[in-house]
Amino acid sequence: APLAESLLQYQRLNLNNKSIHRHRHHNRHHNNHDLQMRLNPTSFKGTDYIITEFPRPSLRRTPNAPISKFDDEFSSKTQTMLSIMYESKGVGLAAPQIGLNELVFVYNPSDSKDMERVVCNPTITKFSEDVIVEEEGCLSLRSDECAGQVARSEWIETEYQNELGQKVRRRLKGFEARVFQHEYDHLKGILCYDRFPPEDREAVQQSIDRLLGLYDEDDALIDPDVEEARAAMPRPLSARWMPPLESDDDDVSKGGDDDVDVVFQKQKAKKGVGGFGMGGGGKKTGNKKEKKKKVKVRNAARSDNPKFKTTGKTKFASRK
């Protein structure tokens, strides 16, 4: 399958499969028989690295060590990370996810290897106020069921070093911006689960409990660093967003708790590339003029009700 159809960090969410929604419903009622755990590969070609799963401490440990040597050994390491990413049919991989507490991740948001990126010592210098909400999961959480809504900035401005140690400044948007933010979170000890609204956290708790039960060491780290969690941008959703019952616009803009414009797309919108949930990259709606709704005309000749005007429209027809 092409990369645009698969994920490493973000579990594939087949919105056309109604059984997924049924499983989520059962999860809320703690039905053990309906929990489907996705098993990670136990090995990868040419390396001893494996996928680090929650609650192993490397996923939460901060601060991670900055990259200072951009030599052949480092280049070989990043190529190994890319190979693991591709072998897993994914779009990104952060060092903590293979047990390395270093400030580096790799990703490729396209089907072309020309878009491969090695990101070292990154900083996101600016987050857009507009955010896009889509469903995300994580390979380190191991379960297709462990997915939920995550708000990400529509665009970001970044600074980092590439695989040669050269300084790079880029402005990213859409799907690439979402991938970058997800990987960046891993370097801060943040998992997408930490960003889920309360309803989604409750829905996946059985999966989290199962992973905790499978880990038999005494060094588990369950929660992120408090300061890192407080500094995480954009802020997690305080409640799960549901599409409005009626809307003639392709996009619906709704104010958030922190005066952030949250852009949600309707269920009928094109599904995002790379296995994300509904919504795709979204359309910027911050300054877009509101579309005029179609006015329904009723035939006044069929009614004696004086509320109808002679044009046949009700007095409510012109409401916006």
Image (cartoon, rainbow, N blue to C red):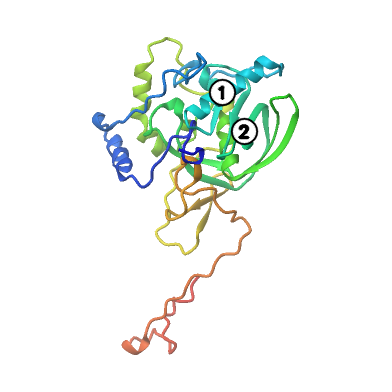
x, y percentage for residue 34?
26, 33
Q: Residue 147: x, y in percent? A: 42, 36
Residue 94 at least partly seen: no
Q: Residues within 10 Å of mark 1 (few under 14, many from 20)?
A: many
Where residue 177 appears, x then y in whole percent?
Answer: 60, 40
Q: Secondary structure at mark 2?
A: loop
Residue 139 sits in which quadrant? top left
Of residue 310 and residue 292, the one placed in the foreground of this image is 292
Residue at 42%, 62% (x, y): give it. Answer: 246
Which amino acid type is marked by label 1?
Met
Question: Looking at the image, is 75 positioned above or below residue 320?
Answer: above
The residue that disc 2 covers is 116
Height in image: 103 above or below 204? above
Task: Quadrant for residue 152, please give it.
Answer: top right
Type of residue at label 2?
A: Glu
Say whether residue 268 is left or right of residue 173: left
Q: Front-most of 241 and 272? A: 272
Task: Kindly state the secondary structure of the residue where label 1 is placed.
Answer: helix
Task: Tell me if I can see residue 100 in this picture.
Answer: yes
In the drawing, what numbered circle is on residue 304? none
Judging by the rendered image, the residue that carries numbered circle 1 is 81
Q: Position of residue 21 (x, y in %)?
A: 32, 43
Residue 27 is left or right of residue 297, and the answer is: left
